[in-house]
Image (cartoon, rainbow, N blue to C red):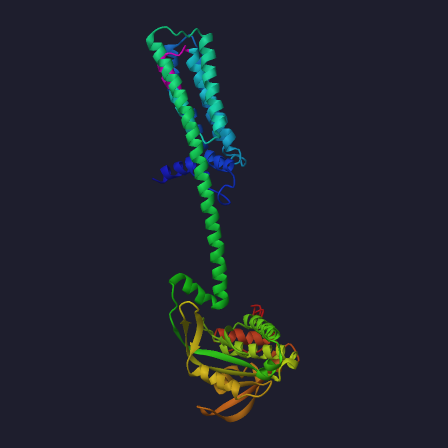
């Protein structure tokens, strides 16, 4: 079975399409010719060998028949050898056409030399009927048929072929009919090939357009939804809600936005917010957190979802420090910014049928919002649960217990900066190698000392 499969692949599988659908009809004909080039050469090389003894028995006076048969075998072998050249696929149509011309004309010559005797005339008609199978332009196929008939008639006349008797006339009429029918089918086959190529090209273009549209939709989904959620939605058609035991939520709000909005043209206001939020989006990507939504001038992100991480609180605090630094250079637009951070359990999922959105629910979200509203201008207000998760990375100052609406008193902390020993800048916003060593240790849940060397490169964040 394996041997037969290899032989079939060798004969017919050499010409797999490369680079998409052929751009022109000639390219399509070249591909079709390439698919059958080897098997055509093999048939031409072997099919005539059994006739050598018959020719010798029927016409011992014509040794040229032997040479003509062997020339066809040589042409077939030459075609097979040519098929192994790197340029063969590009020139397959020419090679197959040359082989067909050799076959048609040699058969016509053999039939003419034997004065068109019955057995040879039948074989010649059979070869003529093969012309529509050759994937070449119809004008070339017609020329090939005409050349074969001309060779037959000229050779036959020179060999003294007569037209006496009804049987001879009947046979020659059959030959004429076979040539005519073959010519008609050459025309029909060429039209069918052109129509098939045209329809295939249309389907190919439509498939490419669909693929491009799908890529745009997937890209849009990935911009609206987290990549894993977009993939699940595309694959399953829906997204299952997931409970996360630990995640961190960050709220950022521009103070003085309402007053500023009342004095600015709508276009300028929207452009200003868009500029801020676009920079926030880039910082979110760099910090490994997921933007959830904007509500007016408020910006909300989550860390640790949709894929859980041990470093969610650290990622969220890095994001908070970076957006505060970004806004500090543009404080003339607003009074300032307040940022709140809280860690805890929550539920995440997708809502909506047409205008869907990835969102989170739970007391953790409410507490994070309270952290922001209970904060101070230009400060990052952090809950105790977040503090416990990031105190080995950041410098924080205790605020003590602060009364929160609906929550009672909650312990709060101000996130000041990255610990000096872990920071590469004076402001304490960008981590150094020691920070990333500790970060990787947290990822793997292994405690290491600051001096413990690691071979891994720090994350480019």
Q: Is residue 92 visible?
A: yes
List x then y, in percent, for residue 70: 45, 19
Quarter of the image where the C terminus is located: bottom right
Tell me, yes or no, whether the highlighted magenta stretch contains residue 88: no
Is 123 situated left or right of 216 in this image? left
Height in image: 341 above or below 60? below
Whole-percent x and y of residue 153? 45, 13
User: Is residue 115 within the magenta segment?
Assistant: yes
Dividing the picture into quadrants, the one containing residue 167 is top left
Residue at the spot x=54%, y=92% of the render? 399
Determine the main secondary structure of the stretch shown in magenta.
Answer: helix
Q: Is residue 272 left or right of residue 404?
A: right
Residue name at image x 48 percent, y 23 percent: 144
Nearest the viewer among 383 and 176 is 176
- Count of numbered badges drawn on the protein: 0
Q: Nearest the camera: 451 or 440?
A: 440
Where is the N terminus found, in terms of image quarters? Answer: top left
Answer above or below: position of 87 versus 146: below
Residue 54 visible within the image = no
Q: Position of residue 112 (x, y in %)?
A: 43, 12
Q: Which residue is found at the position 55% from the left and 88% from the top? A: 375
Q: Which range is magenta?
A: 114-124
190, 81: nearer the viewer: 190
Q: Position of residue 95 (x, y in %)?
A: 50, 29
């Amino acid at each position: 079975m394996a041997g037969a499969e290899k032989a079939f692949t060798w004969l017919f599988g050499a010409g797999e399409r490369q680079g998409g659908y052929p751009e022109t009809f000639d390219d399509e004909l070249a591909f079709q010719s390439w698919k059958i080039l080897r098997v055509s050469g093999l048939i031409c090389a072997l099919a005539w060998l059994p006739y050598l003894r018959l020719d010798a028995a029927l016409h011992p006076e014509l040794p040229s028949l032997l040479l003509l048969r062997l020339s066809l075998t040589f042409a077939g072998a030459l075609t097979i050898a040519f098929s192994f050249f790197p340029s063969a696929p590009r020139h397959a149509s020419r090679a197959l056409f040359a082989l067909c011309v050799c076959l048609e004309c040699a058969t016509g010559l053999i039939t003419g030399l034997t004065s068109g005797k019955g057995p040879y005339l039948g074989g010649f008609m059979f070869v003529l009927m093969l012309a529509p199978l050759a994937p070449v332009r119809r004008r070339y196929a017609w020329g090939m048929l005409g050349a074969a008939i001309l060779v037959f008639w000229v050779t036959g006349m020179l060999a003294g072929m007569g037209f006496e008797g009804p049987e001879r006339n009947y046979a020659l009429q059959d030959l004429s009919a076979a040539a005519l029918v073959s010519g008609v089918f050459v025309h029909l086959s060429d039209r069918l090939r052109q129509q098939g190529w045209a329809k295939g090209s249309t389907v190919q273009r439509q498939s490419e357009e669909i693929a491009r549209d799908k890529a745009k939709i997937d890209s849009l989904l990935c911009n609206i939804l987290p990549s894993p959620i977009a993939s699940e939605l595309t694959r399953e058609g829906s997204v299952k809600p997931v409970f996360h035991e630990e995640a961190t939520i960050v709220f950022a709000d521009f103070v003085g936005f309402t007053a500023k909005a009342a004095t600015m043209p709508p276009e300028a206001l929207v452009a200003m917010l868009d500029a801020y939020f676009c920079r926030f989006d880039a910082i979110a990507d760099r910090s490994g957190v997921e933007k959830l939504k904007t509500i007016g001038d408020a910006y909300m992100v989550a860390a640790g979802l949709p894929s859980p991480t041990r470093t969610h609180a650290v990622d969220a605090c890095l994001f908070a420090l970076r957006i505060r630094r970004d806004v500090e250079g543009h404080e003339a637009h607003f009074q300032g910014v307040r940022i709140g951070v809280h860690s805890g359990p929550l539920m995440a999922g997708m809502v909506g049928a047409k205008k869907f959105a990835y969102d989170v629910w739970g007391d953790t979200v409410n507490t994070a919002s309270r952290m922001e509203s209970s904060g101070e201008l230009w400060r990052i207000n952090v809950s105790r649960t977040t503090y416990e998760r990031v105190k080995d990375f950041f410098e924080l100052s205790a605020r003590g217990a602060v009364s929160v609406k609906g929550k009672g008193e909650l312990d709060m902390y101000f996130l000041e900066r990255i610990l000096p020993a872990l920071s590469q800048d004076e402001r304490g916003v960008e981590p150094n190698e020691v920070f990333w060593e500790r970060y990787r240790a947290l990822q793997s849940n292994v405690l290491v000392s600051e001096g413990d060397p690691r071979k891994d490169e720090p994350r480019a964040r």
